[in-house]
């Protein structure tokens, strides 16, 4: 008889398997089905119960000895669980104060669940601006989210064109985010991860202001993060999948 933890992550894999194809979700209902199962995943289901317990006292003067629980390296770590041509499942473990810069998910649907901790999320959607703007290097984007999230909370869904497809994370406390990408990144298929930053730019014609009434917008340009930004592939120690 499988354990509860094994059953939970196994169920997530199985619902992803029947809901996603190499082109992404099979339907809106399929996304809802995965979202429902993802919402039920707890830190204990993926072997992170000790970290989740310790982070609850992170800001307390009676905090646990952090070095005993959290990795001493300041690097962001990615715990790979599964990947095929249709989807990938993995966990980002982000140390306090670390940042994953603004990045995109071209043509991809993303489901993210904050497992523990507090994170500041800043996300944007591209504005479909026509000429005379040259969008090859700098593009306008509208703000979708700019605020903190704390676990426990519901999972987020980012669609290819809406929901905050370009986003960044800053860990307020140590945190872990369970990510499902469909389809996954693939340079061969044109799904390359690009990084962006805000840049000053004016809108003298007022065209964008007219299109984005009631919304804030910014200009984003692609750039290469500093060499100090590293995401290390880590060993996943949670329940194994029965493939």
Image (spheres, rainbow, N blue to C red):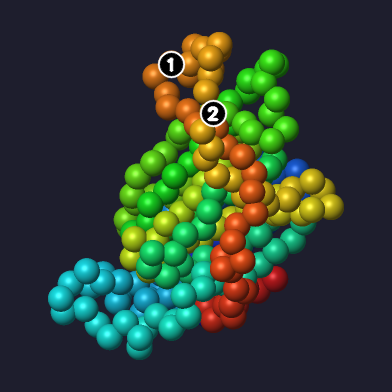
Q: Quadrant of the C terminus?
A: bottom right
Rendered residue at 33%/49% (across/down): 148
Is disc 1 placed on a helix, strand or loop?
Answer: loop
What SS does tag 2 mark?
loop
- Residue highlighted by disc 2: 201
Q: Which residue is mark 1?
A: 213
The tag earlier along the polypeptide, 1 or 2, is 2
Location of residue 168 in the rendering, given as x and y in whole percent from the top left corner: 49, 50
Q: Residue at x 39, y 19 (%)?
A: 214
Mark 2 nearby-residue class (10 Å; few <14, some 14–19, many ≥20): few
**Residue 92, percent across and down?**
52, 65
The residue nearer to you, when weighing 105 against 170, is 170
Q: Is residue 107 visible?
A: yes
Q: Is residue 207 above or below residue 17?
A: above
Classify residue 146 as left or right of residue 208.
Answer: left
Foreground mark, 1 or 2? 2
The numbered mark at residue 6 is none
Residue 161 figure quarter: top right
């Amino acid at each position: 008889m499988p354990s509860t933890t094994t059953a939970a992550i196994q169920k997530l894999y199985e619902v992803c398997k029947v809901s996603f194809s190499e082109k992404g979700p099979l339907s809106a209902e399929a996304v809802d089905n995965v979202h429902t199962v993802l919402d039920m995943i707890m830190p204990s289901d993926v072997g992170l119960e000790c970290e989740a317990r310790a982070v609850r006292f992170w800001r307390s003067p009676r905090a646990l000895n952090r070095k005993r629980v959290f990795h001493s390296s300041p690097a962001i770590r990615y715990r790979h669980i599964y990947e095929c041509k249709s989807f990938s499942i993995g966990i980002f473990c982000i140390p306090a104060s670390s940042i994953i810069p603004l990045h995109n998910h071209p043509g991809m649907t993303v489901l993210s669940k904050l497992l523990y901790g507090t994170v500041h999320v800043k996300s944007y959607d591209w504005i479909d601006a026509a000429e005379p703007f040259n969008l090859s290097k700098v593009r306008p984007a509208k703000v979708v989210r700019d605020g903190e999230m704390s676990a426990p909370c519901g999972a987020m869904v980012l669609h290819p064109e809406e929901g905050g497809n370009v986003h960044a994370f800053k860990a307020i406390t140590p945190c872990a985010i369970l990510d499902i990408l469909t389809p996954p990144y693939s340079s061969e298929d044109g799904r390359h991860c690009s990084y962006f930053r805000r840049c000053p730019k004016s809108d003298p014609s007022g065209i964008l202001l007219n299109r984005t009434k009631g919304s804030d917008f910014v200009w984003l340009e692609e750039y290469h993060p500093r060499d100090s930004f590293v995401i290390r592939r880590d060993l996943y120690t949670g329940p194994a999948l029965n493939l």
